Amino acid sequence: MEDRLKKQEKQELTVNFAFVEGEQTLRAEDIIYIETNRHRNLFYTKDGTFSIYRKLNDIEKDMEGMDFLRIHQSFLVNMRYIQKISSYVLRLTTGEELSVPKSRYQKVKQAYARYQEQ
């Protein structure tokens, strides 16, 4: 089924994907980050992990306007869960740490600073 972005009555942003585990509608705010691993994308959420075979670039386009940030070729992170960015490492509120390549570091820091100003 085609991926869709819907705005519900509460202006809550959701995405609908046909995951390997079955079709799911996820609230954007519940997705912590998305990681590419061997042609499969893993959605790490507050309620579990879901996997899908799609290009991360396509998923990134679907998530546009939902406060997600591409920090690495393999990671798309929900800025709501970023605790700190320093020394090429991004720390999430979950305690996980993800590396930020030197080539993207300034752009990631600037994008997160703009997000914090909103």
Image: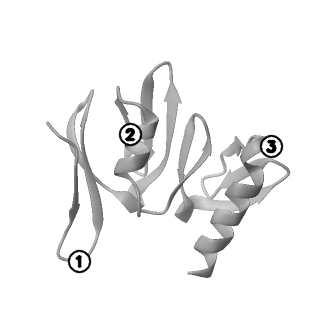
- Name the front one of labels 1 and 3: 3
Q: Quadrant of the C terminus?
A: bottom right
What colour scheme does the image use? one colour
Label of residue 61 in the image: none
Give the amino acid at mark 2: Asp
User: Of helix, strand and loop, which one carries label 2?
Assistant: helix
Label of residue 10 in the image: 1
Give the amino acid at mark 3: Lys
Compared with 65, 41 (above or below) is above
Compared with 32, 117 (above or below) is below
Estimate the spatial distance between the alpha carbons at disc 3 and disc 2, rounded to whole Å.
24 Å
Which percent across, then down, holds residue 7? 22, 67
Residue linked to disc 2: 58
Give the amino acid at mark 1: Lys
User: Of helix, strand and loop, which one carries label 3?
Assistant: helix
Mark 1 vs mark 2: which is more N-terminal? 1
| Circle 1 crowding by C-alpha within 10 Å: few under 14, some 14–19, many from 20 | few
- Residue 100 appears in which quarter of the rendering? top right
Mark 3 vs mark 2: which is more N-terminal? 2
Q: Quadrant of the N terminus?
A: top left
Q: Name the residue at the right extreme.
A: 87
Estimate the spatial distance between the alpha carbons at disc 1 and disc 2, rounded to whole Å.
26 Å
Which percent across, then down, holds residue 106? 77, 56
Q: Residue at x 80, y 43 (%)?
A: 102
Discs 3, 2 touching: Cβ within 8 Å: no
Q: Is residue 37 left or right of residue 17?
A: right
| Circle 3 crowding by C-alpha within 10 Å: few under 14, some 14–19, many from 20 | few
Q: Residue at x 72, y 47 (%)?
A: 104
Closer to us: 55 or 12: 55
Label of residue 102 in the image: 3
Estimate the spatial distance between the alpha carbons at disc 1 and disc 3, rounded to whole Å.
39 Å
